[in-house]
Amino acid sequence: MITNELKGDIMEKNKLELWEEQRIRKMNNNFSEAIKTYEVKGEILVKDLAVVDRIEGDYAVCELLDGNMVDIPIKNFKEKVSEGDIFDLEVKSNNGQLHYNVVKKNLQEMEIRRKKILEKLNKIKNK
């Protein structure tokens, strides 16, 4: 049996969750509006990670943190490029045009992901 106090607590928790969702939605909308404003001025610079998914001809097809796929010319990489490599990336917007500047290979992030994959494989093995 649910008491009135418990019902009140549940309702309060639901209100807080709804408020948090609305706050996050508002933050995202504000961020989106800010990006649109800066894109018009051509002033955006974002740091990102690019995971090399595959090589197609003279391009590395890379997945960004947001899941978008981009083609980056291999000549833009200062180091050897292989599938699975992770690179630090600067994304610049110039009047709506995106430009990708490959900074360097991110060996630390590659090691973290390698360890996570090994942990998952070990869990599967031990089941």
Image: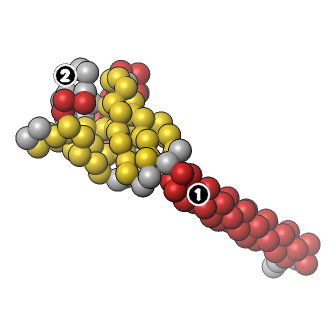
Q: Is residue 45 above or below residue 32?
A: above
Which residue has dot 1 on it? 37
**Does the rendering let one see residue 80?**
yes
Question: Residue 113's quadrant in the figure?
Answer: top left
Image point (79%, 71%), residue name: 15
Classify residue 60 as left or right of residue 58. Answer: right
Which residue has dot 2 on it? 80
Image point (35%, 39%), residue name: 100
Residues 95 and 100: in front is 95
Question: Residue 64's quadrant in the figure?
Answer: top left
The C terminus, quarter of image: top left
Percent position (x, y) of residue 95?
44, 52
**Dot 2 lies on which element?**
loop
**Does the rendering let one see residue 111?**
no
Classify residue 81 as left or right of residue 43. Answer: left
Residue 59 got which mark?
none
Image point (91%, 78%), residue name: 4
Within 10 angstroms of label 2, few (less than 14), some, or many (20 or more) residues? few
